Each structure stands twice: as structure tokens, then as C-alpha cells.
Amino acid sequence: MNKLYLELKNKIEAANSIIVFSHVSPDGDTLGSNLAISLMIENCFNKKVDSVFAGSLPSLYSYLPDFNRFKDVQTIPSDKKYDLAIAVDVASKDRMISGTVIFDNAKTNVNIDHHKTNTGYGNINIIDGEAACVGIILYRIFSEWNYKIPLDVARCIYTSLLTDTGGFRYENTGVECFNLAAELVKLGVSPMEEYRACYETKPQSMVQFQAYIVSNTLFYNNGKIAFAKITRSDMSKFDAIDEYTEGIVEVLRSSKNVEIAAILKETKEGWTKVSLRSKNTNIIPVVLEFGGGGHTFAAGCTIKKPIPIAFDKLLKRIQSEIPA
Ligand code: 5GP
Ligand code: MN
């Protein structure tokens, strides 16, 4: 067995208290992966696991098995010492927000991730920057452990795969994704049911909010750059919650001309949360300059400035990436 997978198995067997972390602004990969490993540990090792998120928990993913087990990290005492802490899909430690100290205080901490920008902040680091999603890495681990994967776990891994490949469409979609999808379907997953649950259950106000934001997009450099702003007042107009912005930036990128698309969203603190997507440009250097991270064509950062200032800075920086 892979040495790291065995080490993780030994740590789980020896642990009396286990916590699994998702990143702030959780997406389908971090939530699906969290549930997958939490349920796997409870099923196969008969241990109790705390599954936690940071920020707000998107109800878009409430169809996932045992979704109600998620606890807000703020409900865990910051001085609680776990035997084992596991982070899934957490590109940098600070993305656990107040969970970072709990992660650091654990007897052993494990970092399972697929971001190329991950620095390897765990005692055990299982990182593959080429993996399409963390669910793929978990499936490799579970397969080597040689336990049968329950349907609930298979469904969680499927959501991780479905969402991080953009429905098997992004550049990260390869042979391993389709092989894994086939294995998951063999375990009983229904692609249609998961697709509908994941993408076709939006509240009406979310569809209308997204249309409004998209229709106010600003285009630069002959339409190669698309920037959309989301202020707190836009959000309150539609009673929008954080998860309502999910998927907007991909709509902007769907324009034929667009090479780089950005969403600039006002945070509760008045700062600017940026979601960036590109077609061919490596945008990692851009977000690293602003203290963020992510993948080659999908990355993000938070700029600690109000939207108008962040907008100008980011636009200038992105224009420098686009040939005239
Ligand atoms: P999104 O735009 O969907 O929030 O994020 C796209 C990708 O970039 C995700 O893989 C996400 O983990 C990463 N990302 C987004 N914001 C940040 C950030 O502030 N810091 C880091 N390190 N990664 C981020
Ligand atoms: Mn991911």
C-alpha cells in the first residue's frame, strides 16, 4: 500500500477524536470530500468524526447524504485538542478560518488536496496537483485500504468529481475521471439524479439574481475580459445569500471572446472576494500577488479593499496578461 495511505489508516485506527475540515465558501468538492471521508471513517473504522465547515454552509448541497452532520467550526472550542485533524480541498491553512488553530493543535494533522499552490502545511500531506478533485484522491486511498465503498460515500465522491470538473467539461477532465465515474455508477450512483439535485434545484430568486448580475457585466479589451460586480445592496435586492453567486463566473467565461472572467463580490467586511476563471491563461500568478490561490484556470483571492479600488487594481493586472 502507498506509504502515506497506510500512515493515514494507522492514525485513524489509533485516534479517539477526529475532525475533518472543509474550506471557507465551501464548494461541492470540499463538502463532498468531507462527507466521503467522514462517513468512510465512521463506517469502516467505527469511530466518531466531527465534520466542520467555515463561513456559511450552502444549502445547494443539502441533497448530499448525512449533510446535517456538518457543524460550524465556530461551535468547536478553539482549545479542543483532537488526536487527528484532516483538511480536504483546503489550498492554504488560513482557509479553515478559526479552524486553523484547531488543525494546528491536533496531535496529527493531515492535508489532502489537489491545488498546485498547496504548500504542504500538514504533518501528513497527500497532495496531487494533477488530480481533478479531492474525491479522486480519496477514492485511490479507500481502494487501497480495501474496504467496500458504501453508496452514500460513492455519491459524495461523485459530487466532488461532478462539480470540480464542471460536469466533466474542464481541462482537468481525463481518463481517471471517467473511470472513477464508471466505478461510482457501478456502486449505485445515478448520474441523472445527482445532476438534477446539484444543478436543477435553484431557488427562483437565485436564477433572477444571477441573470441581473450577468446582464450588468462590463467587458474590456474587445470582450476578452469580463468583470462583474456584486455589492451587498445587489444581494439584498434579491434576498441573495452567499451561495447565489455560484456558477456566475462560468457563465461570463462562456462568451466566445472572453479569455479571463472575474466576479468581484463585496464581503460583509466591505472587502472584495474575487473569483477568477480563464480559458488558456495561467491565472495563478495573478491571485498569488493578491494573497490567494487555486488552479491554473480557476482561482481566487480576497483583496482587502472596497470593490472600486480592487476593481481597478485587478483589471490593470489582468490587462497585462492579455496581448493587445
Ligand atoms: P472560487 O472562485 O470558486 O471561489 O475558487 C476557485 C478556486 O480557487 C478554488 O479551487 C478555490 O479553492 C481557490 N480559491 C478561491 N479563493 C481563494 C483564496 O482566497 N485563497 C486561496 N488560497 N485559494 C482560493
Ligand atoms: Mn477542489
Image: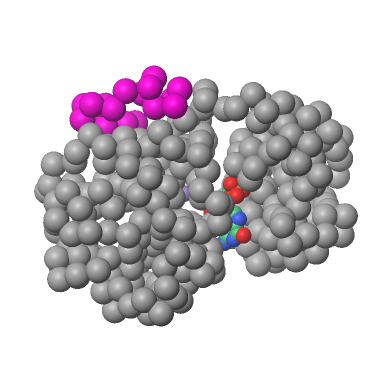
Task: Please tell me in which quarter of the rendered image ligand 1 is found.
Answer: bottom right
- Quadrant for the C terminus, please: top right
Specify the quadrant of the image occupied by residue 245: top right
The relative height of residue 309 versus residue 104 in the rendered view (above or below) is above
* Residue in view at x 33 percent, y 72 percent: 109
Q: Which residues are magenta?
A: 176-197
Residue 277 lies within the magenta run: no
Find residue 273 and report its horizontal and vertical position in percent.
70, 55
* Residue in view at x 68 percent, y 39 percent: 240
The relative height of residue 88 versus residue 322 in the rendered view (above or below) is below
* Residue in view at x 20 percent, y 53 percent: 42
Specify the quadrant of the image occupied by residue 186: top left
Say left or right for 38 vs 159: left
Residue 168 in view here = yes
* Residue in view at x 19 percent, y 65 percent: 12
Say left or right for 160 vs 295: left
Say left or right for 134 vs 165: left
The relative height of residue 43 versus residue 107 in the rendered view (above or below) is above
Find residue 204 and report its horizontal and vertical position in percent.
64, 24
Q: Main secondary structure of the magenta part?
A: helix
